[in-house]
Image: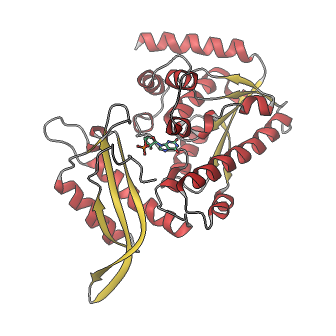
Amino acid sequence: DWVMGDYIEEAVAKIREQVGDEEVILGLSGGVDSSVAAALIHRAIGDQLTCVFVDHGLLRKDEGKMVMEMFAGKLHANIVAVDASEQFLGKLAGVNDPEKKRKIIGGEFVEVFKAEAAKLKAGGNGHKGATFLAQGTIYPDVIESGGAKSKKAVTIKSHHNVGGLPEQLGLKLLEPLRDLFKDEVRELGVALGLPHDMVYRHPFPGPGLGVRILGEVKKEYADLLREADAIFIEELRNFKDAETGKTWYDLTSQAFTVFLPVKSVGVMGDGRTYDYVVALRAVQTSDFMTADWAELPYALLKKVSGRIINEVRGINRVTYDVSTKPPATIEWE
Ligand code: XMP
């Protein structure tokens, strides 16, 4: 609509004025905020922007592919993709404690990103070197970091809005979404041509599948979880509620699959199986501080369970998490 069109024009002019002929780096996660920030900044300064996408090996199925197709393929933005999955999985070997895992993933992320940023700052290859670091900070983040915050509130900040990173890198900060609420960021994203499904995605934690694999993280577990979770999300998008006409993906605030590293017995054909278990989690909430488990239709649960057990070799049992927050949390770790 024209209001958003005006907003984009104004925001673009502001970014051009602030950046001039200098260059900008942005950490792209595939999440809503960094994606919209990237699309907006790219609209304003095109090739003066370089996005860095770090794959820590704990992303959802096809996430890297999707980000590359959108930003490199469709928008023709400069993007550096770093596959650091082996490095992350190496650091996580033997680590069981959830908070330790978070620290390792967050810390490693900052290291990998800093190394890439330093290269881009140095310039070369036709680039004179970046002087700005862009972040997808939105208004609620600004408020949150000003006031008192819980331990979780600190970890909720994604790796991409790391406090102090611009100073450490000697880069100026560019935060074009600072005045916007989440729903405004989404509207902006759609107006900039980002796909609806990308802009209206459920939130995904920075540590990714790292906190959805209970205990030690292994590549084998992550690969199984990626497949199972993709099936769950696909069916949530397929199933519509008859009354509202909305998909169950849109009727839930967050939904995902959790990998339980325990084995249980099953049968398949003439044989006995002894395989892993996953739990499905789907919640409805307005603020993520309290949450209800979603009353998903049995037909949906049946479809998902049948597909996971038949299609994902290595998983022979699916459970549904019926715990409210509190006392449970949304994530299992
Ligand atoms: P819990 O599990 O605390 O989750 O009920 C509340 C919301 O926060 C997200 N969450 C995280 N996000 N890094 C993040 O970026 C984290 O370490 C983290 N832990 C939880 C969770 O997905 C939910 O939306």
Q: Can the viewer see residue 123 in this picture?
A: no
| Residue 155 position within the rendered picture, expressed as x and y whole percent measured from the top left | 55, 40
Give the residue at x 78% y 33%. 168
| Residue 103 position within the rendered picture, expressed as x and y whole percent measured from the top left | 62, 49
Residue 312 vertical placement versus 143 (above, below): below
| Residue 239 position within the rendered picture, expressed as x and y whole percent measured from the top left | 23, 48
Q: How is the image coloured?
A: secondary structure
Left or right position of 190 against 141: left
| Residue 32 position within the rendered picture, expressed as x and y whole percent measured from the top left | 49, 34
Residue nearer the viewer, 238 or 184 = 184
Q: Can the viewer see residue 299 in this picture?
A: yes
Q: Quadrant of residue 308?
A: bottom left
Give the residue at x 70% y 23%. 173
The residue positioned farthest toward the left in the image shown: 243
Question: Which quarter of the figure is the N terminus placed in?
Answer: top left
Left or right position of 6 against 170: left
Residue 18 vertical placement versus 84 (above, below): above
